[in-house]
Amino acid sequence: QSYFANGTLDADGSVMITASHNPGEWNGFKLCIANAVPISGATGIMDIQKIVEEKSWKKADKTGTMSTYDIKPEYAAFLREECKKNGVEPVSYTIGADFLHGSDGDLEKEIARLKGEVEIAAALGVNLMRHDATRGYDNDKRGYKAFGDALPRIIEGCRAVTEYAKTFGIRTMVENHGFFCQDSERVEKIVTGVANPNFGVLLDIGNFACAD
């Protein structure tokens, strides 16, 4: 997506902040120059390291500006067309979610964000969308809170998203993934709590082995 945005918007460069699927404290930068060329050892990454170590960066001549542009709809349409050209049928869309912490802990905003992802799934032409439930309580803040305390909020979020997705003909699901929502009894409580035939589970038997 970062490479697509770089090329589509004719940018001089791009930066993606990501830890992939790892914890946020592992965040790093994916850097590109123009034409979505990754910055590597052959294209300047060692020069950047030297500048940082020597603190020899130059101050910009003028202050830049900031604007927001949502590239996802265009990217989804592009991927759908590329799949069509190559005889590939997309069937599912996977997205991160956290009904406890996502969107700065605002449940309604996190639900709204996930509804936006449902629209991306529809643009891709898929009929399935997998999302997370939550990573759970942080150890330094959980106190005596347990899964039962989070369950009503998880159910509310999952139900709202799947009801919206149903209007697009898309079924939603959580995966038994991430430890906090990983063991079989907890997954069952989420599914039975949502109580909607449009909502289910992406089942990973190996993940059960980590928790049950």
Image: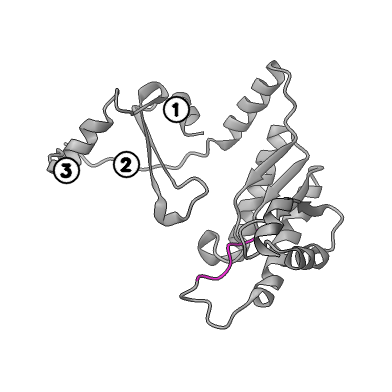
Horizontal side, residue 148 vs residue 16: left or right: right
Relative vertical location of residue 45 with respect to residue 209 in this rendering, above or below: above
- Considering depth in this image, is 104 or 92 the residue closer to the camera? 92
Residue 147: x, y in percent?
66, 73
The residue labelled by disc 2 is 65
Comparing 108 with 173, the one in front is 173
Q: Which residues are magenta?
A: 133-138
Q: Position of residue 206 (x, y in %)?
A: 69, 52
Distance of label 1 from label 2 (alpha carbons): 16 Å
Question: Closer to the observer: label 1 or label 3?
Answer: 3
- Residue in view at x 48 percent, y 25 percent: 8
Q: How far apart are the alpha carbons under marks 1 and 3? A: 31 Å
Q: Nearer the viewer, mark 3 or mark 2?
A: 3
**Toward the viewer: 183 or 152?**
183
Query: As drawn, is 203 to the left or to the right of 70?
Result: right
Above or below 1: residue 22: below
Which residue does the numbered mark 3 point to in the structure image?
53
Q: Residue 104: within the magenta?
A: no
Q: Residue at x 78, y 39 (%)?
A: 127
Report the side of 102 relative to 151 (left or right). left
> Residue 24's quadrant in the figure?
bottom left
| Quarter of the picture holding the C terminus | bottom right
Q: Secondary structure at mark 2?
A: loop
Q: Which residue occupies 63% across, 27% down?
A: 79
Which residue occupies 60% across, 35% down?
Answer: 73
Which SS type dominates the magenta stretch?
loop
- Mark 1 lies on residue: 9
From the top left corner, tell me how far across and down residue 6 is, in percent.
43, 28
What amino acid is at disc 2? Thr
Q: Which class describes the residues within 10 Å of circle 2: few (<14), some (14-19), or many (20+)?
A: few
Looking at the picture, which amino acid does disc 3 mark? Glu
Label whose residue precedes the other's in the sequence (1 or 3): 1
